[in-house]
Amino acid sequence: MNFKKIYISYRPIFLVLPTFIFFLVFFIIPVASLFIIAFDKPVTGVLALQGEWTLKSFLRIWNRSLYFDAAVMSLTLAALVSIITLIIGYPLAYLIAKTENVARNTFLMILVLCAMQLDMVIRLFGLMVLLGDNGVINGALMYFDIIEKPIGLMYNKLGVVIGLVQFSLPFMILSLIGIIRGISPSVVEASRSLGASPNKTFWNIILPLSMPGILAGTLLVFAISISSYLVPALMGGWKVMMMPLHVYQQVAEMGKWQFGSAIAVVLFLTSLLSVLIYQKTAIRIAGGRA
Amino acid sequence: MAIQYGHNVFMFDLKLNNLSKKFDELLAVNDVSFNINSGEFFSVLGPSGCGKSTTLRMIAGFVMPSGGKILIGDNDITYQAPETRNIGFVFQNYAIFPHMNVFDNIAFGLKMRNINKNEIIDKVKKSLEQVNLLGFENRYQRELSGGEQQRVALARVLVTEPQILLLDEPLSALDKKLREEMKIWIKELQRKLKITTVYVTHDQSEALTMSDRIAIMDKGKISQIGTPTEIYEKPANKFVADFIGISNFLPLEKKSYSGDYINVSFLNQNFQLKINEKINQEFSSAVLRPEHIIFNPNTDKDICILEGTIDIISYQGAIIRYIINSNEFKFISEFSNLPESKIFKEGETVKFGFDINNLVLV
Ligand SMILES: Nc1ncnc2c1ncn2[C@@H]1O[C@H](COP(=O)(O)OP(=O)(O)OP(=O)(O)O)[C@@H](O)[C@H]1O
Ligand SMILES: [Mg+2]
């Protein structure tokens, strides 16, 4: 009856309304369309909805080991990248979190963030200059006669992993910094004073208390890696067939919208399922407190 | 239900020799020395930022001294890692491990000492009994009140039978009533265990009620070390007199020495004060405690008699505080609120005085 009254009693809804509309238009609707198209009759070159529902596309995915292999490849590489990124990122995040000097801390943060400011493609070109057969590393190794022929650092799984790690490292570091910084110094001192060496303190106190950051970071990196198209395309040279490459191939090169969407749906569900399983297990291991 | 720990058998005294700590330009702890006897309850008392925590943290090994030595018995521990010192530290925020329940928190120190499982279970149980927390084994930090966390922190430290117990303002996060209870409880526990204890606080009532001896710290230096009585009744300098309790500082003019006496004047009155060990030769004023002021004094030769008007009355239940204005000098005086005592009114003119033998020159 009176707008102000309505506004006040439903204020939380009003506050999130713009975000909700944005989310609906630019995320839910596109993804939902993809889901719908995937169940439509596959016709090459046709994007429009025909309304002839079928599981043909999914059956084809199921019957071709090509796609199963791609799913396995995507999952293993994404998991591997998450672990490597964690191992590299944790010490860096710890260093930044424990640097109290404001100037030094800001400098380190800028280093991390500036890695994110260059476009993905440009950064990958940079990596290519470094890792290519005529690149800096191979050139140097050959110059000093350590190797005779270039070693393959790119256009294989190694290249893809290096590319994905490079891309996702800042996300890992940012997920960890806040959590590590939140660990009270007196808890660490208490552990030392109760007889734990720095090493034991790390494994018994610091690492378990970093768990929320580790969980968030690895989940984020996993999701980024499993869905990455650009990195396997450029760093893998279309030799490391992760699932997004198949989606791109079917849709952009062959115009098979329905089949491409079906692969995307499978990718999405695979990713979602593995994330859920991981989260459940991690929380169980951490005793429900992660 | 008394628990016998090793403390009763082994004796550990703690010595600080000329201990200093510099943070960049700031001399946070400046040449601090004291000896704490085995089983003693020793407090370090001082205003915020005077270097109390830094001193304590050097004893624990969390801060490396810039100079000086720390000894337990004859054992120099100055540069030993904290985990090898066998010193218990109770933090202001308790520092309970948030990812472990109460049992695992208390067992932590024992596990680090590779004690076998059955013995750990046994010791943790006894320790929980001692702090009245049986049945709390499976709780996490977020499920404990401040007082309970505080007792877990104490149990966690005591179960490892440390040589020295260090407490850094352990009561400051508790409400007033709980603080009063915990004061007595900690003191009783300490006395039972006979554990050498260093207690840091900025609350003088805590230090005065709990301690065997107190060190008063000011700007990184020790101002005075003494029993609570000595600290209150014979403050070594103006800072101590000002920091502990309430003081009227009477500005004195030095006249002359005559034998064992010194002639001074205050508010145009001359007195002769006996020189004894409590007199600081550099004195510039005399400390008069509020409770040493009396109304309508008799005219004894050692009594200084003054006249003034009551400026402010502040009724505090057990005591009544009068601010008396005499020739523009404001005296703070305190009287027990006894049934027979006369209560003055603001503006009333009164005759009052004090025994000059109660003055402390600083
Ligand atoms: N890690 C540090 N780096 C630089 N300065 C420090 C550090 N720790 C303490 N200080 C400084 O040293 C001085 C003494 O600090 P300390 O914590 O010992 O004081 P305190 O007596 O415990 O005070 P409070 O009652 O407020 O706890 C302070 O001026 C403080 O700012
Ligand atoms: Mg302090």
Image (cartoon, grey):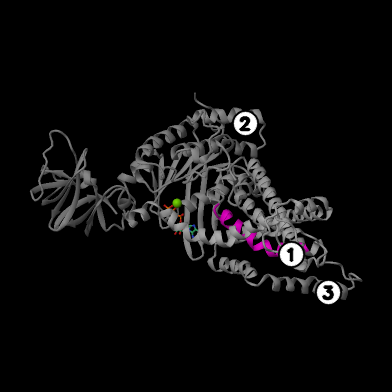
Does residue A117 sit above or below A29 in this rendering?
below
Q: Distance between the Cα atoms at labels 3 and 2?
A: 59 Å
Q: Distance between the Cα atoms at labels 1 and 3?
A: 41 Å
Q: Position of residue A116 (x, y in %)?
A: 63, 68
Q: Position of residue B66 (x, y in %)?
A: 54, 59
Q: Nearer the viewer, residue A133 or B351?
A: A133
Residue A162 appears in the picture as rendered: no
- Look at 60% across and 41% down and name the residue there: A288
Q: Residues within 10 Å of mark 2 (few under 14, many from 20)?
A: many
Q: Nearer the viewer, residue A122 or A147?
A: A122
User: In this rendering, which labeled residue sits more in front, label 1 or label 3?
Assistant: 1
Along the horizontal axis of the image, is B217 left or right of A53? left
Image quadrant assignment for residue A159: bottom right
**Badge 2 residue CB within 8 Å of ligand 2:** no
Residue numbers of the magenta segment:
A160-182
Which residue corresponds to mark 3?
A: A140
User: In this rendering, which labeled residue sits more in front, label 1 or label 2?
Assistant: 1
> Does label 2 lie on the same chain as label 1?
no
Q: Residues within 10 Å of mark 1 (few under 14, many from 20)?
A: some
Check disc 1 and give the amino acid type: Val
Which residue corresponds to mark 1?
A: A251
Q: Secondary structure at mark 3?
A: helix
Does residue A8 sit above or below B98 in this rendering?
below
Q: Residues within 10 Å of mark 3 (few under 14, many from 20)?
A: few
Q: Distance between the Cα atoms at labels 1 and 2?
A: 64 Å
Which residue corresponds to mark 2?
A: B120
Was residue A181 drawn as part of the magenta stretch in this picture? yes
